[in-house]
Structure formats: structure tokens, C-alpha cells
Amino acid sequence: MEKTDVSFLLSLPLLMLWGYSSIEKVLFWQESYRAFLNQPFPNPWGIVLAYVVPGFEILLVILLLFPETRWWGFLGSALLLNSFTVYVGMVWIGVFPETPCNCAGLINLLNWEGHLFLNLGFFSLTVLGLWFTKRGAEAPPDGVKLKSD
């Protein structure tokens, strides 16, 4: 199996995650906006994040779709998932005095521990995706030599 194929297969779950998550945030904007304001950080941050997070998720979908930009999509996914995982871990161990609402569609069905492990699984996909994807372009298949100019 070529690296391109593996890279594409690893991107599929992330495409579904970011696609679903961003569409839900846009379609149910008021609920999403209120959920960001309900988080344990200052409201100005919540306002900014309510716009930035869905926009970044849409950007990740676009980057992951194309072999030429897939590395950047995996990198951005790793950064966003790392942020989410740290936050969920902090909620899970009780860092915040109040437990904010989970407010993430289907992920609402999970408890915080389940959410943490789901994030770690998706983060693992991003690490593998970065491994199989060369920055800026797909790596040539094994045994293929590129001509030098």
C-alpha cells in the first residue's frame, strides 16, 4: 500500500470528525455560541472561540482533502486535538469548580473519561498521518527515485 493511500485512509476519520463538528456548530449556532460562553474562561475568549473553532475545523477539512495540503491538515488536527484533550483532561480530574457542559453533539453521549480516550484515539491518527505524509506533498512510493534538475 502506498503512503498516499495510508495517508488518505488515516484522514477519513478526521474528515468525518471535523466535518460533523463544524457543520453542527454552524447549523446550531445559538446553542454552540452559548456553550462557548458557558466554559470556565473569560467571556471574551468564548466569543472569539465561538467563531475561530468552527472556522479552523472547516479549514482542517479542506486541508485534509488534498494530498498536497494533507500534512498541514494532520498538523492542525494534532494541535486542535491536543488543546481539546488537555481541556477535557482538566475537566475530568476536576480542575474547574463547575463542570461545563459537554455540548458536542454525539460526543454528549460520552462521559469525560470516554471523551478523553476518544480524543487520544483521534490524536493517535494525526501522529500516524504525519508519519505517513511528507510536508507539502505526498512522499513517492518506495523504490521510486525522483529526477534531480
Image (tube, grey):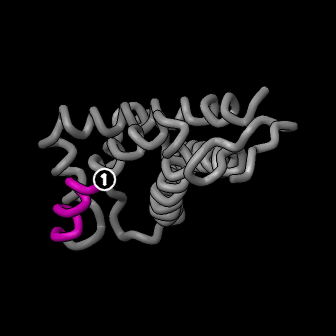
User: Is the stretch drawn in magenta largely helix, strand or loop?
Assistant: helix
- Label 1 crowd (10 A; few <14 / some 14-19 / many >=20): some
Q: Where 137 falls versus 79 (above or below)?
A: above
The stretch drawn in magenta includes residue 114: no
Residue for point 19% across, 59% down:
37
Residue for point 50% across, 60% down:
79
Q: Where 70 falls versus 47 (above or below)?
A: above
Front residue of 29 and 15: 15
Percent coordinates x, y for residue 47 in the rendering: 16, 62
User: Dividing the picture into quarters, in which one does residue 78 lie?
Assistant: bottom right
Front residue of 126 and 118: 126
Q: Quadrant of the N terminus?
A: top right
Front residue of 91 and 98: 91
> Where are the magenta residues, as a range?
43-52
Left or right placement of residue 38 versus residue 84 in this view = left
Q: Is mark 1 on a helix, strand or loop?
A: helix
Residue for point 81% across, 42% down:
145
Question: Residue reaching furthest left?
Answer: 30
Percent coordinates x, y for residue 32 in the rendering: 21, 45
Front residue of 149 and 49: 149
Left or right placement of residue 37 versus residue 141 in this view = left
Question: Residue reaching furthest right?
Answer: 143
Evaluate whether residue 117 shows in this view.
no
Marker count (numbered): 1
Percent coordinates x, y for residue 137 in the rendering: 59, 46
Q: Residue type at mark 1? A: Val
The stretch drawn in magenta includes residue 48: yes
The residue to which callout 1 is attached is 53
